[in-house]
Each structure stands twice: as C-alpha cells, then as structure tokens.
Amino acid sequence: MTQYSAAMQIFLRWAALACLSIAAYAQATVTVTDVRSTAKADSTRLVLEVSEPVTYRKFHLTGPNRLVVDLSATSTKLPPALFDLTTGQIRGVRAARRGDGVRLVFDLSGDFPSKAFTLAADAGKPARLVLDIAGAPAVVQPARSEKPAAKPVPTITEAEPTLAAPGRDIIVMIDPGHGGKDPGALANGGIREKDVVLAIARKLKAEFDALPGYKGRLTRSGDTFIPLAKRTQLARDANADFFVSLHADSFPKGRSVYGGGVYALSLRGATSETARWLAKRENAVDLSHGVDLGDVDDDLRKVLLSMSVDSAIRISKQAGTEVINEMSSVARMHRRRLEQANFVVLRSPDIPSLLVELGFLSNAQDVKRLTTPREQSKVAAAIRRGIVSYFERSPPANTVVYQKKRSNPEPYVVVRGDTLSAIAQKNGTTLAAIRKANGLTSNAIRIGQKLEIPRS
Ligand SMILES: [Zn+2]
C-alpha cells in the first residue's frame, strides 16, 4: 500500500511537472514586432517580423473572401500598423485571440490565392512570416447577384472572430475659409465671410462630434490666417478621411446672384464660368501673400497623375452630389449640380475634398440666411447628412462605421433568375438558414424581395 502510494506520488509529481511545462510552452512566446507591406497593382506582399520562429496555418474563406492566418503561441499585442493596412487586394485586417495564439483575418477584395513561408533570423534581421496575395482587384465590383454561381462554397465551421482592434472614427476636417488678415467677402453691417464660415464650421464640427463613429476637426477655431497649402497639410496630419472648405463669397456680377454651390477639384478645367471665377478668387488669397501655388511643381504633378487623385476626386464627386441634394432641401442653391475647378485648397491628392459655397454675401437674402443661427444650423446639418450618407455607403476599412456595416450587412435584394439555393450557395450559407432567418415557409421568392443573409 505504501509502495503504491509512493509510486502514485512520483507519478503525480511527474504529471504536475509535465502540466507545468505544457502550460509554460502554451503561453504566448512569439511577438509580432513589426509589419511591412509591398503593394503592387496585382499583388501584395506582407512581411510580419516576429520575435521567434512562428508556427502558422492559413486557409481561405469565401462569401466574403477572406484569408485566415492562425499564428500559434503568439501574443495578441500586434503592431497597430497591421490594422491600417489596405491595398488593392486587402480591404481590412482583423485579429482575435485563438487558443494560445492569434487569428488574423484579411478581408480580401477578390478570390485571390495566397502563399506563405517563413524566414529564419539572419544577418541582423528578425525571423519573418511572409504572405503573398496575388490577383488584380476587379475595377468594377459586379453586383452580388450578377456573379455566376461558380465553385461550391466551403462551409464555414469556425466562428467569425471578434474584432481585436476597435474601429477608428471617420475624421472630417472642416476648413472655415479665410481668417485673420484675410476677411474674405464683406457685406453691409460689418459682416465678414471669415466670421460667417467660422460660425457654420463650428456647428458642422458639433454635428459630426455628436455622431458615433465620426469626429469633426477644424483647420482654424479662431480668427487666424492660414495659407491654403497649410490647410490641406493639417488635414493630412490629422489623417482626415474628408476635407470640406466652407465659403460665402460675394459675386461681382450682380447682387441678384444667390444660393449655395458645391465644388470639387478638377485637374483639367472648370466646368462653369462661376467655378472658374471662384477658383481664381480663392486661389488668389495666397498669391497676394507671396506664396506661389499657381504652378503645380514636379512632385505634386507626379502625385496628381497617380491613381489616388482620380479616386479621391471620384469620392469627392459622389459625396458632393449627396451634399448638394441635402443642401437643396434647406437652402437656395446657385447650382444644382456639382461643379469642378482647380481650387488650390482642394489639391490634397489623397483626401477627398469639397469646397462648399454656402451662399453669396453680395445677396441680401443670402446674408440674412447665413447670419441667422437657426439657418446656420440647418445648413450645417445638411452638409453633415450629405457627407455621412456617402460614408455610410462606402466606409473606409477599420472604422467604426465599417465594422457596424459589416455586422449588420444590408439585406440581399432578389433579382431575376435568383433561386433561394443559389443565393444560399453564393453567400456561404444554407437554404434552411436563409428560410429560418426570413421566416419563409417555401423556397418561393420574388424579384425585389429583401432577404436577410444569416452570418455563418
Ligand atoms: Zn471665400
């Protein structure tokens, strides 16, 4: 009996030690110390620098397309740059704890294959995990319904990971035009453009700040002079997602000219005489202070030729159209379509930007409207609604708005030729799950019907 007991004790001691060492082994020992990416039009290479050689496994999921990489025994403390990553192939990155390690989920913009390999530490370089994702992103995303029901979609058995990085706010940089020694347009009664636009800019900032997922910023919060180039620099420094410059000029051609207008950057020419005149006038502010921004320098020319400008202008135009629609409902408009001209203040190549002409200080009715607090609030709310309706449709990855949209995807709208089983297959779910989610008693659907697609 005592012998048995001694053997048992030895066994227990051994077992305890073994458990201890397993537990120690299971603790996160690898840290991802840095992430670098090289993005080309048709591929992305990601290099994760790790403190020690890492064991990984990767697989793909479709509907929507994702690349999942599980890193064993890895700390969930990840470099923040990882979550800011977007390339032609990667729309966003999420992470979650998984066992003793971490699961990385790359949201892909298409069904792209990937390769992965590890590199040992050498020549002063740390150990690395290299991920290559290849494939040209589609220029135009076909509507979900137009995609052929191609290869069978694998069933997703593993739960969608929770979000590790909290989403960031969408930052809207609001630029009240003029300021300081530059009063802008003047009207009777000592009314100055710089004061009018500042009052409305403050209200617009408050509108965004009151909205979850958005943050308003001001290029100037007081009566200070800021050169035009500095204004866009402030937006870039703040990592702004959008830039909106507010003005209320006076029009020399007549006091009968009235109403608001919305302008985007054009690299070619002005779309109207008013747009050309406004651009000349707004651009002149800096010329008169000795800063020559009239000629595009070589560096800027290069940037202007890049894709990002085209995409920034495209976003500006889409958002601008929304702003016009909203403004039209609360204020008189000079023009009901988006105008374009070469405004210096809008030349931030990477940030979608708009110049909003709130009205004309040369017009008595506009002056009254723009100096009445209630009317100021109305126009600020309209501009906010316009910008927000753009972002609600196309939120940048890793923002609160993006995550909310992902977790509450819009319902699927049935189109001609759809069958319930094809919809289920396309979305990586089952016929039964769709029927249950929508309370359907048969497989009959009709064109235009909205269906909730259950998340697997
Ligand atoms: Zn102005």
Image (cartoon, helix red, strand yellow):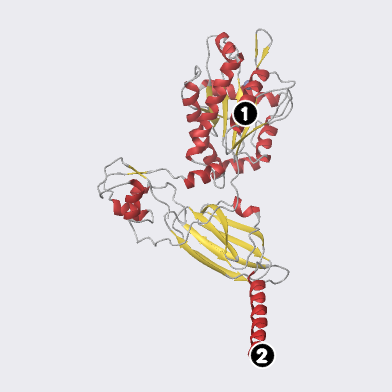
* Residue 414 position in % (x across, y down): 31, 44
Residue behind mark 2: 2
The answer to which of marks 2 and 1 sits earlier in the sequence is: 2
Residues 259 and 453: in front is 453
Secondary structure beneath dot 1 equals helix
* Residue 101 position in % (x across, y down): 60, 65
Give the quadrant of residue 235: top right
Q: Is residue 271 visible?
A: no
Give the quadrant of residue 362: top right
Is 236 placed above or below 144 here?
Answer: above
Q: Answer left or right for 155 relative to 200.
A: left
Residue behind mark 1: 206
* Residue 422 position in % (x across, y down): 31, 54
Which residue is outermost to the front?
A: 1
Is 348 placed above or below 94 here?
Answer: above
Q: Dot 1 surroundings within 10 Å: few (below 14), some, or many (20 or more)? A: some
Cα distance between the residues tagged 2 and 1: 79 Å
